[in-house]
Image (cartoon, coloured by chain):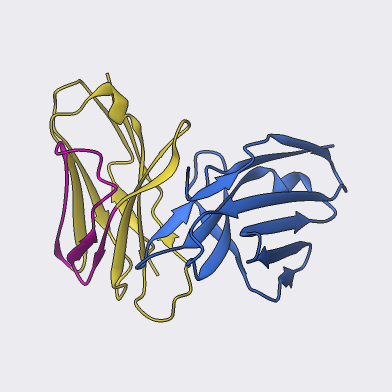
Chain colours: A yellow, B blue
Amino acid sequence: DAGVIQSPRHEVTEMGQEVTLRCKPISGHDYLFWYRQTMMRGLELLIYFNNNVPIDDSGMPEDRFSAKMPNASFSTLKIQPSEPRDSAVYFCASRPGTLNTGELFFGEGSRLTVL
Amino acid sequence: RKEVEQDPGPFNVPEGATVAFNCTYSNSASQSFFWYRQDCRKEPKLLMSVYSSGNEDGRFTAQLNRASQYISLLIRDSKLSDSATYLCSAHGYGNKLVFGAGTILRVKS
């Protein structure tokens, strides 16, 4: 079975440009999470969805960040305009809506560098 | 204060050593806890869940102390392949899984 698929794997862009990160969760998983990981701050939860509906976006740093999930098999995280401090690895993760197992299935991440 | 805190290490240990990591959590309402392993430049993967009664999986033992709000991971007979970053996590309000910053383990021959 395919795991969580993220694209692009690597993105280098210049400050001020728009960045769109994409995620395809595992089929049948009801929850989708976006995390950001940096050396300084570790793994931070940005936003999560349940059945395509955003449930908690309190971790989204500021208005420059937005996330959507138009259907059960696709989500995007957009940064506009991007800044150097947004450089990080962005992980998408999903899990089924059954028991509270806590096991998240992570994608391989999108490594973003903003110059 | 962060919801989940860990000693970042690194822990440098020889092969065969026993090493233990602790992790504290601030949200007393947290219901479940987990240890994840993350290899360099890879995604985190679940290592094991942490149950109130403690649980063991081969060389790995996880324990939970609710009174003191900490969880621990013990690795016996360390292998070179155990070198990684270990992330503890707590399932807090709603369905949020919050992670610590991770503890780096380096096992050397």
Q: How many numbered tags mark residues here?
A: 0
Front one among B16 and B11: B11
Q: Quadrant of residue A73?
A: bottom left
Magenta-highlighted residues: A47-71
x, y percentage for residue A4?
35, 59
Q: Residue at x 73, y 69 (%)?
A: B57
Judged left or right of residue B91, residue B49 is right
x, y percentage for residue B109?
85, 37
Q: Quadrant of residue A109?
A: top left
Q: Which residue is the extreme one toward the right?
A: B16
Judged left or right of residue A40, residue A82 is left
Q: Residue B102: within the magenta?
A: no
x, y percentage for residue A72?
20, 69
Judged left or right of residue B2, residue B23 is right
- Main SS, magenta region, reads strand
Front one among A24 and B65: B65
Judged left or right of residue A58, residue A44 is right
Front one among A54 and B38: A54
Instruction: Point out the image quarter for the C terminus of chain A.
Output: top left
Instruction: Point out the image quarter for the N terminus of chain A.
Output: bottom left
Q: Residue at x 19, y 51 (%)?
A: A76
Q: Residue at x 30, y 72 (%)?
A: A27
| Image vertical order of residue A77 relative to residue B72, above or below | above
Front one among A21 and B97: B97
Q: Residue A59: within the magenta?
A: yes
Q: Residue at x 39, y 62 (%)?
A: A3
